[in-house]
Amino acid sequence: MKKCIIIGSGLGGLSTGVVLAREGFDVTILEQEAQIGGCLQCFSRRGVKFETGMHFIGSAKPGQTLHRLLHFLKIDDDITLQELDKDAYDIIRLGHKEYRFPNGKEAFISQMTAYFPNEAEGIRRYVDCVERVAQSSSLHTLDTRNADSALSTEYQLRSINEIIDGLIDNPTLRDVLIGNLPLYAARRDKTPFSTHAFIANFYNQSCFRVVGGSDNIGKALLHKLEQYGGRVITNRKVVKINADDSHVTSVTTADGQVYPADIVVSAIHPVPTLQMTDSPLIRKAFRQRMSQLPNTIGIFSVYLDFKDGAMPYMNSNYYAYRPGFSPWDCEDYTQTDWPRGYLYMHFCHEPNPQFARAGVILSYMRFEDMTPWLGTQVGQRGEDYERFKLERAERLIDSLEQAFPGIRQNIRHYYTSTPLTYLNYTGTPQGSAYGIARDITLGVSSHVPQRTKLPGLYLTGQNINSHGILGVLVGTVVTCSDLLGTDYVYQQIIKANQ
Ligand SMILES: Cc1cc2nc3c(=O)[nH]c(=O)nc-3n(C[C@H](O)[C@H](O)[C@H](O)COP(=O)(O)OP(=O)(O)OC[C@H]3O[C@@H](n4cnc5c(N)ncnc54)[C@H](O)[C@@H]3O)c2cc1C
C-alpha cells in the first residue's frame, strides 16, 4: 500500500483522499484546524448554524455533471438538497430594477428576451455560446467523446467582456448577464470567458442549497474516506515537505511529528506549499511564477440570525448593485462608496422551510483594508478591528434595507468575518475568496499544474482547475488521473453512473 499524505481537509483534500483510498492508497489527511472542511465549515452561535464558504451548488440533478461526480464519490445519498426557485434561482438588482434567472436554456432565453426584446438575437447567440463553451471541455461534461479542445482553448484566452460586448449592445443587459459575477470575482479584460460559461451553465442547469449546511458534504466525504481505511488528523499543521535527492519522503507538522509518505498531495494554495520545501528539483523560476500569480479578492461577510418566524425564506440568491455601478466595478470601491454591491442569501436548515433562521450578506473586501491588523490572531485583533467590522456590517445592512425595507427589525443578532478570518481558517494567502485568479493576460503562465518537478509531490484543490464545488472536484479528477491514469478515472466515473 502506497502511503499518501494529503495536506488540508477542504473539499479538494477530502475528495482526493476518498478516490485514492478507494484505489488502495493508505491515505492520511493532515488538517491544521480543529474542524475539517476548509470552506465547507459551518459555525454555530446561540444555536443557529451558518455556512462560511459553500452556499449553493448547481448541476446536481441525476445525469448532470455534479450529480455524476457526487455519485462517483458515493456521497449523493448522504446529503439532502433543496432546489432553488426554478423561475428565479438568481435575482439581479441593478439600481432599482430586478431581473430573474430561470433554470433551463429556453426559459432563460425567453425571460431575458422579455426584459430586452430588442436583443432577442444577441441573447440566443450568447446562450448558445455559453452552452458550446461549457460543453467543449471534457473536464466539465466528463464526456471525452464530444470535447472540442480548440473551442475550449480559444475561450480560455478571450475575456468575458470581449465576448459579451461583441454579442450584446444594451449595456444594462450586459450587466444583467454578469450579475452573479461575485461567484467568480471576475475582472474586466482579465477573466476568461470560459470561467463565466462554466459557471453560468452549471447553475442554469439546476441550483440547490445543502439542507442543514454545507459541512454535511465534508462529513459525508470523511465517512467515505474512513470506510476505505483512510483518516483525517485535525490540529496538525504541516510545516515542511521533506525529500531526498529524487523523491518526496515525508512531511513534518508544527508539533514536530514526521509522517512518512510515498506521495504527498497538497490541497492548499501552491505558494505556501512551495515554501514548505527547499528541494532544488523545484526550479526557482517555477517558485517565482507561482508567487507572482494574482489572487482573487477577499470577502466581508455578515451572518444574520433572524428572529423566529419573522423572515420568510427566500428561495433565491439576491445580487444587488447600487445605482450607477456595474458588477465589474465593485472590486474598485473607495472607502466611502463601499459596498458597491453585495450577494444576499438565506440558509436552508430543513427541507422546504417557510421561514429563514439565518442568512448571509457577502461583499468584496481587499486585503489592503486589513493592513492595520496583519499578524493579529482571531479574537485578539483589538477594539478598532471590532469597530471597523461593526461599521462595515451596518453599511451592508443599510444597503440591504434599500432592497428589503424593514429587514433590520427581523435581525436578532449578526456576526462578521473578513479576509483575515479566511486567512486564519483556511490559510489561503491574502484571505482570497477563490484562490488564484484566472488571467488571460498572463497566458499559460497562470496555469497551476497538478504535479510538481519534485517526484511524489502533487497539487489539488481550487487552484488546479477552478474554485467552487465543480471546479474543485474537477481538480480532484485531474490530480487523481495523473496518479491513476486518465482513462481509468473516466471509466470509473462512467461505470459508477451506469
Ligand atoms: C465566502 C465564500 C463563498 C463561497 N460560496 C460558494 C458556493 O456557494 N458554491 C460553491 O460551489 N463554492 C463556493 N465557494 C468556493 C468554495 O468554497 C471553494 O472553492 C472550495 O471549498 C475550496 O476548497 P479547497 O479544498 O480547494 O480549499 P479550502 O476549503 O481552503 O481548504 C484548505 C484546507 O487546508 C487546510 N490547511 C491550510 N494550510 C494547511 C497546512 N499547512 N497544514 C494542514 N492543513 C492546512 C485549511 O485549514 C483548510 O481546511 C465560496 C468561497 C467563499 C470564500
Image: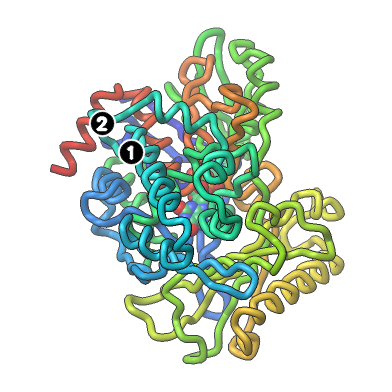
Residue 31 in view here: no
| Above or below for 453 versus 35 | above
Q: Position of residue 84 (x, y in %)?
A: 37, 68
Quadrant that contains the C terminus: top left
Instruction: Tell whether 152 sits left or right of 205.
Output: right
Quarter-of-image position of residue 497: top left
Whether pointer 1 and pointer 2 mark residues with C-beta atoms closer than 8 Å, the reply is yes
Above or below, comparing residue 333 to residue 487 in the picture: below
- Identified at 51% across, 18% down, the residue is 248
Q: Relative to 13, is 394 on the left or the right?
A: right
Q: Nearer the viewer, residue 339 or 419?
A: 339
Question: As rendered, which of 292 and 143 lies closer to the eye?
Answer: 143
Provide the residue designation for mark 2: 146
Residue farthest to the front, as pictured = 118
Q: On the image, numbered disc 1 is attached to which residue?
A: 135
Q: Is residue 11 visible?
A: yes
The three-letter amino acid code for the residue at tag 1 is Gln
Among the 4 quarters of the image, the one containing residue 170: bottom right
Q: Secondary structure at mark 1?
A: helix
Q: Position of residue 270 (x, y in %)?
A: 59, 31
Name the N-terminal-most of marks 1 and 2.
Answer: 1
Disc 2 packing (10 Å; few <14; some 14–19; many ≥20):
few
* Residue 162 placement (x, y as % from top left): 57, 39
Q: Residue 167 versus residue 389: which sits nearer the camera? A: 167
